[in-house]
Image (spheres, helix red, strand yellow):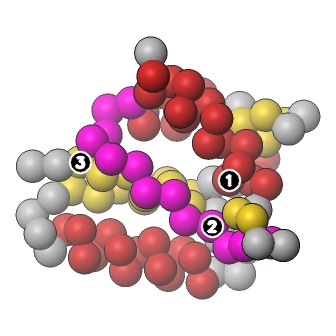
Amino acid sequence: MSNIAIVYFSKGGATRTLAKTIQTGIESTSCNARLFEIESRDIKGGRYVNDELLSSLKHFDAIIFGSPTYMVLPVPNLRHLWMPVVMSMSN
């Protein structure tokens, strides 16, 4: 059984609703899905500082990122998390 992390930032709630819908769909296939909401307070000086979340993501088989867009890009809150996740997965 696969374990899938759904990591998202939601300003107005639409991305949160979509993340929960994706979680329901994943769980209907007998896989496990866990939601992680990115909080603005976890970003300091342009760096993502929630080491607990970064560490826990190593234990998932897949990670889905969800974000509203701003000027065609994901919001900075989520972009600050990507690089540390990618770097930690490659070790």
Q: Nearer the viewer, residue 38 or 75?
A: 75
Magenta range is: 58-70
Residue at disc 3, secondary structure: strand
Task: Give the quadrant of residue 58.
Answer: top left
Residue at image position (9%, 49%) is 1
Task: Give the quadrant of residue 61.
Answer: top left
Image side of residue 19 versus residue 3, left or right: right
Task: Give neighbour class at mark 1: few <14, some 14-19, many 20+ (Cα, 10 Å).
Answer: many
Residue under label 1? 78
Residue under label 2? 67
x then y, percent, for residue 10: 65, 70
Residue at disc 1, secondary structure: helix
Q: Report the Cα–Cα distance between label 1 and label 2.
A: 7 Å
Three-letter amino acid code at disc 3?
Asn
Residue under label 3? 3
Q: Are marks 1 and 2 in contact (CB under 8 Å)?
A: yes
Q: Are marks 3 and 2 in contact (CB under 8 Å)?
A: no
